[in-house]
């Protein structure tokens, strides 16, 4: 089982660099809404090689910066929240400069913010010599975002509860993944509101996906892919439907990741993902085409 917890690079002058890997949901079922307002889910998370880079270095004062001017770096940023959440565990927290190099699109269903948050937790744990275990970081991360606990360790994992109850699954081969990110925004909170108002939604058999993952069956995984969110996001966001149709025309099996709008498809092992990517780059407008792999 691949784990990210110890994937920490120590550079010059005590600088720490962390890879913040994105995720897709091979299967995503919303079970229902809890009395506290959160939603129970049953999902199979899968890490992908596409990632941000989080660098932590000493500073005279705390700073959070990013290489994208449109990314807000104040207390609402999950990376900032990770710093605030871990500081109480350090007797004398040393000020740091946290730099985010973004490759994962923002608000895309790929856990970009959660991945950065988890990378900051891992990096500061080593930078401040806190010696916290992965379980501790997952528990801290659960209070910050539903996908953060998974992003702490990554891999192939079944998530339940609000996504914070994690059951590791066998690692899958490094199959190629085509990712299409249309330039539209789908707010996760509003997506859950649509679920609450929906009369009925299609059933997603996450257990079937788990069985297919355990047997590493490419065909079985493609058959079992499903996402509750698609029932009400696809009809309302035509760009998502266009991405699914474009991948379907190539003979691939597309699925929206998380609450969208990003759509992905696994590339059969015998096919060349770069061939598909080049075709889509010519065809798709206002859509980012990315080729990556499972890790």
Image (cartoon, rainbow, N blue to C red):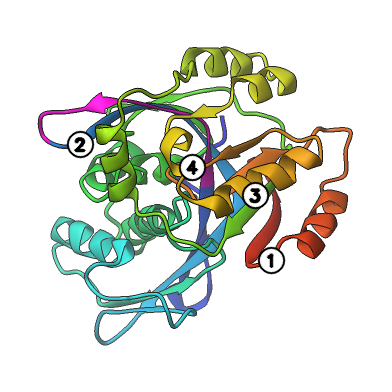
Foreground pick, 181 / 74:
181
Query: Where residue 264 appears, x then y in whole percent?
Result: 63, 44
Whether the residues at callouts 2 and 1 have beta carbons within 8 Å, the answer is: no
Q: Splitting the image into 4 quarters, where does residue 212 fall?
A: top right
Position in image of residue 244 (x %, y %):
65, 43
10 Å neighbourhood of mark 3: few (<14), some, or many (≥20)? many
Residue placed furthest toward the left: 35
**Residue at image x 49%, y 80%?**
67
Instruction: Please report the bounds of the magenta region as a residue range.
Output: 23-36
Marks 3 and 2 sit apart, C-alpha to C-alpha, by 29 Å
Label pair 3/1, CB-CB below 8 angstroms: no
- 255 on left or right of 231: right
Residue 75 rendering spot, x and y as whole percentages = 22, 70
Is residue 109 among what the camera can see?
yes
- Which residue corresponds to mark 4? 235
Residue 285, which numbered label? Answer: 1
- Judge depth for marks 1 and 4 and give the one in front: 4
Residue with the most extreme bottom position: 60
Q: CA distance from mark 2 to mark 1?
A: 36 Å
Q: Does 295 appear in magenta?
A: no
Q: Residues within 10 Å of mark 1 (few under 14, many from 20)?
A: few
Q: Which residue is mark 3?
A: 243
Q: Is residue 262 visible?
A: no
Q: Earlier in the sequence, mark 2 or mark 1?
A: 2
Residue where numbered disc 2 is placed:
38
Marks 4 and 2, Cα distance to the nearest angstrom? 24 Å
Asked if the stretch drawn in magenta spans residue 29, the answer is: yes
Q: Quick check: marks 4 and 2 in contact, CB under 8 Å?
A: no
Please name whichever residue, 13 or 21, is drawn nearer the observer in this view of the structure: 21
Q: Is residue 1 left or right of residue 168?
A: right
Secondary structure beneath dot 2 equals: loop
């Amino acid at each position: 089982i691949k784990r990210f917890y110890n994937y920490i690079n120590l550079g010059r002058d005590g600088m720490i660099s962390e890879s913040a890997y994105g995720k897709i949901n091979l299967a995503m079922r919303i079970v229902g809404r809890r009395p506290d307002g959160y939603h129970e889910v049953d999902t199979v998370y899968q890490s992908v090689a596409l990632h941000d880079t989080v660098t932590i270095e000493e500073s005279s004062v705390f700073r959070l910066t990013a290489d994208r001017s449109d990314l807000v770096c104040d207390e609402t940023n999950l990376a900032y929240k990770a710093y605030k959440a871990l500081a109480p565990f350090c007797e004398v927290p040393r000020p740091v400069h946290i730099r985010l190099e973004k490759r994962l699109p923002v608000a895309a269903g790929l856990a970009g913010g959660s991945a950065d948050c988890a990378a900051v937790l891992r990096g500061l744990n080593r930078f401040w010599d806190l010696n916290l275990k992965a379980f501790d970081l997952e528990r801290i991360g659960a209070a910050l975002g539903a996908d953060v606990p998974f992003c702490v360790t990554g891999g192939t994992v079944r998530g339940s509860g609000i996504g914070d109850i994690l059951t590791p699954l066998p690692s899958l081969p490094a199959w190629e993944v085509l990712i299409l990110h249309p330039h539209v925004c789908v707010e996760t909170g509003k997506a859950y509101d649509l679920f609450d108002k929906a009369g009925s939604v299609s059933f997603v058999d996450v257990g079937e996906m788990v069985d297919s993952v355990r047997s590493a069956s490419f065909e079985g995984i493609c058959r079992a892919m499903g996402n509750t969110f698609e029932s009400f996001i696809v009809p309302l966001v035509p760009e998502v439907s266009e991405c699914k149709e474009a991948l379907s025309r190539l003979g691939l099996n597309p699925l929206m990741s998380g609450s969208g709008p990003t759509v992905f498809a696994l590339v059969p092992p015998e096919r060349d993902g770069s061939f598909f990517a080049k075709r889509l780059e010519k065809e798709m407008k206002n859509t980012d085409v990315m080729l990556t792999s499972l890790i």
